[in-house]
Image (cartoon, helix red, strand yellow):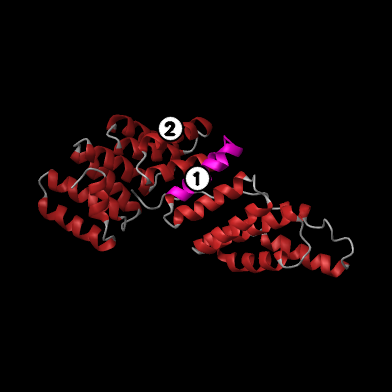
């Protein structure tokens, strides 16, 4: 699988902290309120480049003593998302857990904690959170797609397909969903349906390395070597260091009789990702 596929955090309402801030703070001085409102506003920043600023502002807001439970839930959630953007997944999980203490029924927070757990490799834990989020909001597309990705990682492809079918019914305009279903259908051996899904993903756009890589794998598994090579070439034009496409092209070249170039591709792929051969073995390919 192309590792560019990611779990998706839920989107919150940027002004939520402002609207929930001042409960119980009527006796505060105006300057104190203004400072706390400023921290609340900065706590809503989602720019990955400003994650440290978000964390600092959320921390100041949490420690201000001005917030009601809803405001605290949002602040911990926002800080958790900032930690996730920085790759600090253990800290993110702690913040999301704290946020749930103040808003236990929030599907958004459950989904966001699942994202952090998934990025830590705890796919079973992530699955539980995504399922809990869907119990609260059955049509949350982020949670549906994320649960499908968790099922994929756990090799439960039947349930992954069920969730992707559901996500596509809700959001048929999203090419990434069609690409993901193409990938799963390839893994379960339904290459013809997989190619049709990848074709739709590419039609919807944009043309990405992941989409060409997925269709290349479908062609590879259905022994269509030339078409596989063409798609892996297209993927590598977009991302020359995509190990999955290099390895797939190497296998297709060897199968089509070009052993020298094929072995060179395999070596280049292994240099980029040491586990790539094991990944392909998991897909049912040598």
Residue 147 in the image: state x and y as whole percent: 47, 42
Q: Tell me which segment is drawn in magenta.
A: 124-141
Residue 204 in the image: state x and y as whole percent: 44, 37
Q: Is residue 222 magenta?
A: no
Which label number is shown at residue 231? none
* Residue at the spot 53% in from the left edge and 46% down from the top edge: 129
Q: Is 253 on the left or on the right of 13, as rendered?
A: left
Read off the residue under disc 2.
Answer: 162
Earlier sequence position, callout 1 versus callout 2: 1
For label 1, the crowd category at 10 Å Cα-Cα, with few meaning under 14, some 14 to 19 and many 20 or more, is some
The answer to whether marks 1 and 2 mark residues whose Cβ atoms lie closer than 8 Å is no
Main secondary structure along the magenta-highlighted residues: helix
Label 1 vs label 2: CA separation? 17 Å
Whether residue 180 is situated above or below residue 272 in the rendered picture: above
Whether residue 144 is situated above or below residue 9 in the rendered picture: above
Q: Nearer the viewer, residue 192 or 234?
A: 192
Read off the residue under disc 1.
Answer: 128
For label 2, the crowd category at 10 Å Cα-Cα, with few meaning under 14, some 14 to 19 and many 20 or more, is few
Q: Secondary structure at mark 2?
A: helix
Q: Secondary structure at mark 1?
A: helix
Q: Is residue 131 magenta?
A: yes
* Residue at the spot 45% in from the left edge and 52% down from the top edge: 118
* Residue at the spot 43% in from the left edge and 32% down from the top edge: 162
Q: Is 196 on the left or on the right of 41, as rendered?
A: left
Residue 170 in the image: state x and y as whole percent: 53, 32
Query: Exactly how many numbered labels are in the figure?
Result: 2
Residue 248 visible, this orientation: yes
């Amino acid at each position: 699988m192309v590792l560019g596929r990611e779990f998706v955090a839920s989107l919150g309402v940027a002004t939520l902290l402002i609207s929930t801030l001042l409960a119980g703070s009527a006796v505060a001085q105006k300057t104190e309120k203004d400072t706390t409102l400023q921290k609340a506003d900065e706590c809503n920043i989602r720019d990955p480049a400003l994650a440290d600023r978000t964390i600092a502002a959320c921390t100041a807001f949490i420690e201000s003593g001005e917030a009601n439970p809803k405001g605290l839930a949002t602040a911990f959630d926002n800080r958790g998302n900032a930690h996730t953007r920085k790759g600090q997944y253990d800290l993110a999980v702690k913040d999301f857990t704290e946020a749930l203490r103040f808003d236990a029924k929030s599907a958004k927070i459950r989904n966001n904690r699942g994202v952090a757990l998934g990025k830590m490799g705890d796919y079973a834990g992530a699955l539980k959170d995504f399922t809990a989020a869907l119990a609260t909001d059955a049509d949350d597309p982020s949670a549906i797609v994320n649960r499908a990705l968790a099922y994929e990682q756990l090799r439960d492809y039947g349930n992954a397909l069920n969730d992707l079918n559901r996500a596509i019914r809700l959001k048929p305009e999203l090419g990434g969903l069609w690409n993901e279903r193409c990938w799963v259908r390839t893994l379960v051996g339904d290459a013809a349906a997989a190619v049709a899904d990848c074709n739709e993903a590419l039609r919807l756009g944009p043309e990405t390395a992941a989409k060409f890589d997925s269709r290349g794998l479908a062609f590879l598994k259905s022994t269509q070597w030339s078409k596989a090579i063409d798609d892996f070439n297209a993927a590598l034009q977009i991302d020359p260091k995509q190990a999955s496409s290099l390895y797939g092209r190497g296998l297709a070249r060897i199968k089509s009789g070009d052993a020298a170039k094929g072995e060179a591709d395999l070596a280049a792929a292994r240099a980029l990702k040491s586990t790539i051969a094991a990944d392909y073995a998991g897909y049912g390919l040598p």
